[in-house]
Image (cartoon, rainbow, N blue to C red):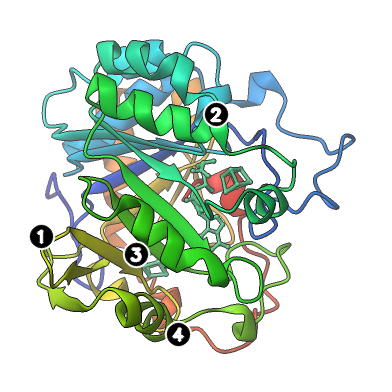
């Protein structure tokens, strides 16, 4: 069997997103609404969660199948104890060209140095608004901005760069603050990527009407700071790129609702309990943990991934309708972004 398989639509597997925990210190309404994920919510028990050794074995098998980029995510990955020890295991894997982390950055200021020393290359920080009341509402925990901004600064200081900022735009919630966010990072090396609110999971009450489209986002920012489109950095780049005409940098837009990009989707995802998932909108994944805990060899792990990827036909965003479908999907906080 081909070591680096292509799926049924001819797409290779290049990225593996590893969700290291299903827990989070925030309760963003579009991801883990506080009214559902309250104090009594049962997260995964520790024995169910992959150990660092198990994650490393699965990551190595994925790299043998063609993966070159690893991203740690969650839940909030910085809540996983000793995350730097996992990074130390993943960074030296031959064939890994890019090792990054997506975080809400609330705990980043104190950890950035040790993550960098362990081998992390860069971070993406989720930051939905620089307006304190809006930010507090969106994160669902009334958490303030200061620790997040300190985390971004620390990341830049230690060289976890270029830092990218992810901003999910939800109509009537933070769309009035996106121009300010763009303005704040204009003229710096930090690229803000605005994300259309997606119908991930089953719990965030998604409605098409709440999606602020790429077109609207570009019109708002472009009215103040004229923009021109720029070609992608590489085939399959998720965000479309738009440069300020006065040379003060660029922004990105991830338009997974209005301009789906399934055609070049090369991403697989590993859930905290070891399910390998071939689409963000899947209803289940393949149980890699069972193979690992059953004593399967590295070759057997590789073959299982090859078989799974080889059969892949996912293209959910290209088939989406205005309604969240009745089928139950995995949750974003569980699967990672
Ligand atoms: N807790 C970390 C964070 O927020 O960066 C990592 C996990 S979070 C699930 C990963 C990314 O998914 C974040 O940038 C978040 O904004 C994005 N996300 C979560 N729910 C979303 C939704 N419904 N639509 C679009 N993006 C979403
Ligand atoms: Fe937590 Fe990230 Fe989901 Fe917000 S988007 S609730 S920070 S996992
Ligand atoms: Fe990839 Fe699925 Fe998203 Fe399409 S909907 S881009 S296949 S993760």
Mark 4 surroundings within 10 Å by alpha-carbon count, few (fewer than 14), some (14 through 19), many (20 or more): few
The residues bearing labels 3 and 1 have C-alpha atoms spaced at a distance of 26 Å
Q: Which residue is mark 1?
A: 233
Q: Is mark 2 within 8 Å of ligand 2?
A: no
Q: Which mark is residue 245?
A: none
The residues bearing labels 4 and 1 have C-alpha atoms spaced at a distance of 26 Å
* Residue in the picture at 56% in, 71% down: 176
Ligand 2 picture quarter: top right
Q: Earlier in the sequence, mark 3 or mark 2?
A: 2
Q: Earlier in the sequence, mark 4 or mark 1?
A: 1
Q: Which mark is residue 147?
A: 2
User: Which label lies toward us, 4 or 1?
Assistant: 1
User: Which label lies toward us, 3 or 2?
Assistant: 2
Is residue 145 something that shows in the picture? yes
User: Which label lies toward us, 3 or 1?
Assistant: 1
* 210 sits to left or right of 42: left
The residues bearing labels 3 and 4 have C-alpha atoms spaced at a distance of 15 Å
């Amino acid at each position: 069997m081909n070591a680096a398989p292509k799926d049924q639509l001819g797409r290779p597997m290049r990225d593996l997103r590893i969700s290291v925990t299903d827990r989070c210190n925030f309760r963003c309404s579009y991801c883990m609404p506080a009214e559902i994920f309250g104090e009594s919510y049962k997260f995964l028990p520790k024995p169910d969660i992959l150990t660092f050794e198990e994650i490393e074995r699965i990551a190595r098998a994925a790299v043998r199948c063609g993966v070159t980029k690893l991203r740690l995510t969650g839940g909030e990955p910085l809540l996983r104890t000793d995350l730097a020890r996992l990074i130390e295991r993943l960074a030296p894997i031959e064939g890994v060209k890019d090792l990054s982390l997506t975080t809400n950055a609330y705990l980043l200021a104190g950890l950035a140095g040790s993550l960098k020393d362990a081998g992390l290359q860069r971070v993406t920080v989720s930051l939905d608004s620089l307006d304190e009341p809006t930010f507090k509402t969106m994160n669902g925990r009334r958490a303030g901005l200061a620790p997040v901004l300190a985390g971004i600064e620390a990341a830049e200081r230690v060289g976890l760069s270029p830092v990218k900022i992810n901003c999910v735009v939800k109509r009537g919630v933070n769309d009035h603050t996106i121009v300010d966010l763009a303005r704040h990072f204009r003229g710096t090396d930090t690229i803000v990527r605005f994300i259309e609110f997606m119908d991930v999971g089953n719990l965030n009450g998604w409605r098409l009407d709440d999606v602020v489209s790429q077109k609207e986002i570009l019109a708002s920012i472009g009215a103040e700071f004229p923009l021109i489109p720029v070609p992608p950095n590489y085939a399959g780049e998720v965000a479309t790129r738009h440069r300020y005409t006065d040379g003060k940098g660029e922004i990105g837009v991830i338009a997974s609702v209005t301009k789906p990009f399934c055609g070049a989707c090369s991403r697989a995802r590993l859930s905290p309990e070891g399910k390998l998932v071939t689409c963000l909108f899947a209803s289940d994944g393949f149980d890699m943990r069972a193979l690992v805990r059953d004593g399967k060899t590295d070759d057997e792990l590789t073959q299982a991934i090859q078989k799974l990827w080889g059969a892949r036909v996912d293209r959910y965003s290209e088939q989406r309708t205005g309604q969240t479908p009745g089928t139950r999907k995995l949750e974003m906080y569980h699967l990672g972004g």
